[in-house]
Amino acid sequence: MSPRWKNRPEGSNWGDFGPDDQLGRMNLLTNETRLAAIREVTHGQTFSMSLPLDYPGGDKVSMGRKPPQLAAVQLADGTEKYNFDLARFAPAFTDVINDDVILLHTQYSTQWDALGHVGSLFDADGDGKAKKVFYNGYRGGEHLSPSGEGKGPYAHALGIDRLAETGVQGRGVLVDLHAVYGRERIRVGYAELMEVMAKQGAEVRQGDFLCLYTGFADLVLEMCGNPDAKLLHHSCAGLAGEDQQLLDWITHSGVAAICSDNSAVEAVKTKPRGEDCHAMLPLHEHCLFKQGIHLGELWYFSELANWLDLNGRRSFLLTAPPLRMPGSVGSPVTPVATV
Ligand code: UVW
């Protein structure tokens, strides 16, 4: 029995990894799965799967998220530590120091969503009242609440530091949706995903990272930091989160995480689908809230996809730890593929 819930959501695995679990499907990564992933390495070549972290550019692609702001560290007297020579302390010193600070929206660019990123209004107590609940019954206002020092939000549970502690390494499997659909805005459901995976010989095993190449990040790069948000929101494939068969497949596939080069993994519909209460982001609900499956967004797969195609492969060693930042619900990441 969990101390935090009486009801678990339909289709969820709450409690299956332990009453206080905060890792979700990352629990499926073991020494064996990592060793199998390392055996994927035959050439020793690496690919960065990150965009430059100041892309997409501007603040129109994802509401409220702004580009990183860089500044030099300042000393108490206002002096900036930028080309700062230590000769000022003693003429014998030859050191010149640069030291900077970044104001960074953690989910602006290539990123991981922590399990504390998206929860749901759900009656976990069975008292007929929907409350703000996250994976495994952790609560908004309690586990996701101010730091206690009046310093704004803090994930006391389900923060990105939990993911960082696992090392985040395993077997990646790249499905090339771009090769099939080009830049068409298409909602990829179970049928379409199965067809593309079968055609490309992409097979996922328990503990794999499912990577979806849609071409979205290439389009972002082509816009050179001045993105056309409307065009982006009408371009490239995204998963059809409302497709229950797709969600069931995700549950049974055993994937540890899903990573995409588009902005939300799923193709988001902002209009309600009928009168009944439901999630606007059904894939986020299924993955982050119900199954504890981390989501990677705005990754960059172009060169890796090309290499895998040329070499008749789909899988590789993936290494992608987020920042071990206590209290945060997302993190920039510089994922690396080794082939
Ligand atoms: C939201 O926009 C809520 O999330 P994400 O960046 O994970 O798509």
Image (cartoon, helix red, strand yellow):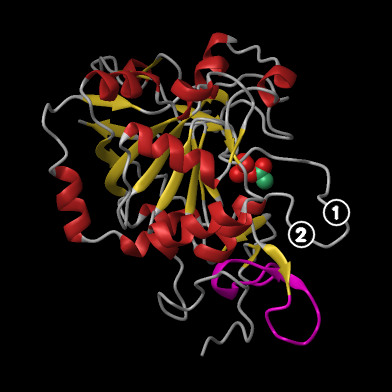
Q: Is there a contact, CB below 8 Å, between mark 2 and mark 1?
A: yes
Q: Main secondary structure of the magenta part?
A: loop
Q: Which sits in the foreground, 300 or 55? A: 300
Q: Is mark 1 within 8 Å of ligand 1?
A: no
Kindly tell me whether residue 211 is visible in this rendering. Answer: yes
**Residue at horizontal 30%, vertical 36%?**
201
- The residue shown at (59%, 74%) is 137
- The residue under label 1 is 274
Ligand 1 found in image quarter: top right
Question: Furthest-right residue in view?
Answer: 275
Residue type, mark 1 in image: Gly
Q: Quadrant of residue 95?
A: top left
Nearer to us: label 2 or label 1: 1
Residue at the disc numbered 2: 278
Taking the magenta stretch, the answer to whether it contains residue 226 is no
Q: Position of residue 151 (x, y in %)?
A: 67, 55
Give the x, y percent position of residue 236.
59, 25
Q: Position of residue 140 (x, y in %)?
A: 68, 67
Q: Which residues are magenta?
A: 123-142
Nearer to us in this view, 72 or 41: 41
Q: Secondary structure at mark 1?
A: loop
Q: Quadrant of residue 71?
A: top right
* Left or right of 42, for residue 63: right
Say if residue 79 shows up in the picture: no
